[in-house]
Structures are given as structure tokens and as C-alpha cells.
Image: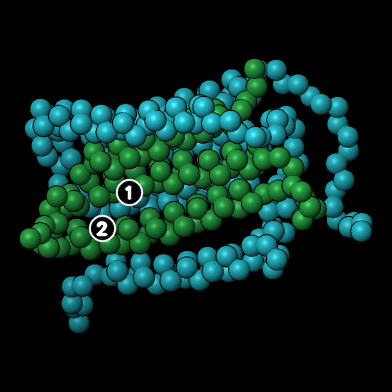
Amino acid sequence: MTDPTVIVPVSIAPVSYGPLPVVLFYGFAGLTLVSAAAVALSANIVRAAAALLFALIGIAGLYLLLHADFLAAVQLVVYVGGTLILMIFGIMLTSREAQGPDSGPSRAARRREIFWAGLAAFALGAPLVTAMLLAPWKTAAFAATTQPTVEDLGRSLLDKNQFLLPFELLSLLLLAVMIGAAYLAKSRRPLPH
Amino acid sequence: MTLTITHFLVLSALLLVAGLLTMVLKRNAIGMLMGVELILNAAALNLTAFNAFAPAASGGGSGPRLEGQIFTLFIIVIAAAEAAIALAIFLNFYNNFTSIDVERGTTLKG
């Protein structure tokens, strides 16, 4: 069965990029983790949003590293360009009161909170990371080269034997969300006539 | 030295912890939503990493296997939907309490 639209990959001699993928990984991972920590620890909500921007961009870079070119684009367009902007609008609409350091709990209480939260995070994170480091995954080797994924993703999303049903259900969900969000956010104040 | 799936799994475990820390530490409801987004991103990164390191498909489709990436796409869409609904709820919360400090929402507290 030959499909003329399928691009047969020409045999490319295996290219070795040396330590480049690892270096890129540590770069993007560092960006992501530092930004995520800044999101968690920043007391100012606008700064947290800015840090979240860099965390999401770092994850888009990791998607590129994992040969998920379309996902990296979607991450930037939907997450950075959509969800994060929505959050920033939410911050702007709801931050009438000053978010200065004097609002909220005292410094000592805040430090105590960070200590206990850090302890809980360590209690969760340490076993999780240990398990990840020890787990013997049966994986394929990391491929240095790849094909674009857009065509295959589109075909599987619209194939009724694969992901057509969840894809269509998702569009229904988005419709319901659109109506629900518009209804919920509607001002309850009586209209002036 | 090459990339292994362990690199990505450890990273996403740490990202999950950071998201949880965000949810616990923030008093601002939108800040808590940011923690949820970090956790969802950790899960999505896991799925994509498993996709990239999965052994080749045994039968089935003709192309490379992309199930993990499709699940990640679904996560991104559902996260966007969740953020939209959550923000609508927070706007209502703000209209009722003139603040989105989650500690103020004590109407149902016994």
C-alpha cells in the first residue's frame, strides 16, 4: 500500500550532535526550574506571572528538544499567548488593593509558611525524584534527527479509529466553557436604562 | 553522555513540586491557578518525554507514534478551558469580597 502523500524518509547518515542536546536540556531545564521557583516564592503576583512566562517558554524549548515541534508552537501560542494573557487580565481586573509587602501576613508568619511548605515539598519531592532516578525504564535511544510531526498529528486527530472522538468532545467542552465563562463573568449589577 | 528519559522525569517531578509549593504558598487565587498550570505542564512534559523515548510502534499506524503528544495537546486545551472558567469564578469572587484573597471566602465556614 503506497500512499503518495507520505514522505518516505531518505536515509540520512546518523548525525551526532555531541553534547549539544544535553547542554540545551540543562539550559532549558534551568530556565524552567528557576522560573518555577520564582513563581512559587514571589510575593508579588505580577512578578509571578512574568516568571511563569519564562517557565512556559522553557518548557516549549524542551518540547522542541523532544522532537515535538508542533507542541512547542502550541505551547507558545496557547499557553503564553492565551492562558497567561488571560491570567494577567485577571490580575489587572482584581488587584485594586495594593499588593505591597505590608498587605497580608507578617514577615515572620510568611517565613514560617515558606518553611513548612518547603518541608512538605521536600517530603513529596525527594521520594519522587529518587523513584524517577531508580526506575529502570525500557526506552528507545534518543533520536538525534526526526521528521516534522504536524502531518501525523493532524491525521491521528481526524482519524475515526484514533482520536477523532476526543477531539470533537474537546470542541464541545470549549463551547461549554465559552458559554459558561461568559455567563459567570457577567456583571450582576442591574443595567441602567 | 546522551539524553535519557530520566532527565525529563526528574525535571517534571521538580516542576510538580514547584507547582504544589505555589498552590500552597499563594493567597491570591490567580497565584494558585499558576500553581495548577505548573502541575499540568509537568504532566504534559512527562507524556511528551515518554512519547519521544517510546520504542517503535508494533503494528498499527504507519507514521511514528504520537499518542503522548496528542495527550499533551489535550492537556494544553483543557488547561486553557480551566483557566477561563477559573478566572470567571475569581471575577465573581472579587465582586462579592472585593478581593481574591482566598482566605476571605469564609461564607460557608462552619
Is the C-beta separation of discs 2 and 1 under 8 Å?
A: yes
Left or right of A106? Residue A143 is right
Q: In this view, does A153 lie above or below A186?
A: above
Q: Is residue A132 above or below residue B98?
A: above
Q: Is residue A110 above or below residue B64?
A: above
Dot 1, crowdedness within 10 Å: few (<14), some or many (≥20)? Answer: many
Q: Residue at x 29, y 43 (%)?
A: B23
Q: Residue at x 12, y 53 (%)?
A: B104
Q: Which residue is drawn at 24% across and 33% down?
A: A117
Q: Which residue extends farthest bottom?
A: A193
Q: Distance between the residues labelled 2 and 1?
A: 10 Å
Q: Estimate the x, y position of residue A165 in percent, counting from the top left.
A: 61, 68
Quarter of the rendering containing residue B15:
top left
Q: Name the residue under label 2.
A: B90
Chain designation of label 1: B
Instruction: Name the element at disc 2.
Output: helix
Circle 2 or circle 1, nearest the eye = 1
Q: Residue at x 22, y 46 (%)?
A: B28
Q: Estimate the x, y position of residue A90 in percent, counting from the top left.
A: 30, 53
Give the quarter of the figure containing the C terminus of chain A.
Answer: bottom left
Residue B33, disc: 1
Residue A81 seen by the camera: no
Q: Which of A19 and B59 is in front in this view?
A: B59
Residue B6, disc: none
Chain A tint in image: cyan
Instruction: Name the element at disc 1.
Output: helix
Chain designation of label 2: B
Dot 2, crowdedness within 10 Å: few (<14), some or many (≥20)? Answer: many
Q: Nearer the viewer, residue B33 or A163?
A: A163
Q: Which of A86 and A141 is in front in this view?
A: A141
Q: The green chain is which one?
A: B
Q: Coloured how?
A: by chain
